[in-house]
């Protein structure tokens, strides 16, 4: 069972910042999850939204600004928007990095270049995306990289069925040759639902111990949490 810090240890530091990532590494969580966008001058940066409105001291659209301009934005506690290359350069050996692609395929050539020039082992990297087309392209250009389909699992209150369902998820998996699924931890997910899926299972975003224990009992491979290190240490005890 792996504990992945969502946008770093974002319970205690601004998400997708070096402070949050460093906390995750210092606290010995098993890895980090981060989000990437592409700037106007083709730098790959770590930030969740397509603009800085929600987290920054000014509102700028990532794709429309240079990294030089974006690097001056305060995204909380004096932290700046980091480059993906900076995160990879500081990542300790053996720590996993789940990279969520938040754009279209235009970012992939830049992502590949950064990965190829980093010292991070391929087996420590994961590409996650809601966009199955991106995942298919990733497998073509990075065949040894593990990829996971993100899915926002929801429950239909009238039929009590989950959607997307197992059949749809398996069809998408077959199309993109992914290695597993990264699923929202919908409370209606049960062990049977997960057992019918092929590949590794990651669930997000779990911050409570009782919910974590439930999904651990279902046999998931990893849990993404805003306070992954805290939950990991609690369960050790």
Image (cartoon, rainbow, N blue to C red):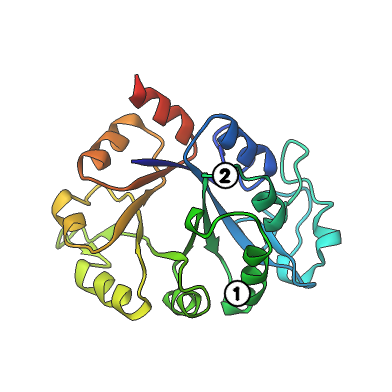
Q: Nearer the viewer, residue 167 or 195?
A: 195
> Which residue is found at the position 47% from the left and 66% from the top?
145
- Up-down relation of residue 200 to residue 24 (above or below): below
Distance (Cα) linking label 1 and label 2: 24 Å
Left or right, residue 27 beside residue 159: right
> Which residue is found at the position 81% from the left and 54% from the top?
71
Instruction: Tell me residue 215's x, y (percent).
Output: 26, 42
> Which residue is found at the position 40% from the left and 30% from the top?
232
- For label 2, the residue is 93
Whether residue 58 can be seen here: yes
Which quadrant does the N terminus fall into?
Answer: top left
| Mark 2 secondary-structure assignment | loop
Instruction: Tell me residue 158's x, y (percent).
Output: 16, 61
- For label 1, the residue is 108
Q: Nearer the viewer, residue 120 or 172?
A: 120
Instruction: Tell me residue 86's x, y (percent).
Output: 72, 52
| Mark 1 secondary-structure assignment | helix
Residue 27: which numbered mark, if any?
A: none
Extreme-top residue of the structure: 237
> Which residue is found at the position 56% from the left and 66% from the top?
102
- Up-down relation of residue 185 to residue 50 (above or below): above
């Amino acid at each position: 069972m792996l504990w992945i810090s969502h946008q770093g240890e974002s319970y205690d530091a601004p998400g997708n910042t070096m402070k949050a990532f460093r906390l995750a590494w210092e606290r010995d969580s098993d890895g980090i999850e981060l989000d990437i966008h592409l700037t106007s001058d083709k730098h790959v940066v770590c930030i969740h939204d397509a603009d800085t409105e929600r987290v920054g001291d000014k509102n700028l659209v990532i794709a429309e600004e240079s990294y030089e301009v974006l690097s001056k934005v305060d995204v909380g506690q004096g932290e700046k928007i980091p480059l993906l290359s900076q995160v990879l350069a500081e990542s300790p050996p053996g720590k996993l990095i789940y990279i969520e692609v938040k754009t279209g395929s235009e970012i992939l050539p830049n992502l590949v270049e950064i990965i190829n020039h980093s010292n991070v082992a391929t087996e420590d990297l994961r590409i996650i995306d809601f966009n199955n087309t991106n995942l298919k392209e990733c497998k073509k250009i990075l065949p040894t990289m593990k990829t996971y389909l993100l899915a926002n699992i929801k429950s239909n209150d009238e039929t009590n069925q989950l959607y997307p369902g197992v059949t749809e998820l398996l069809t998408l998996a077959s199309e993109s040759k992914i290695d597993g699924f990264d699923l929202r931890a919908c409370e209606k997910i049960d062990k049977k639902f997960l057992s019918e899926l092929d590949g590794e299972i990651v669930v997000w975003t779990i911050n409570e111990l009782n919910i974590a224990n439930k999904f651990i009992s279902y046999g998931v491979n990893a849990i993404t949490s805003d306070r992954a290190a805290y939950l990991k240490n609690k369960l050790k005890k």
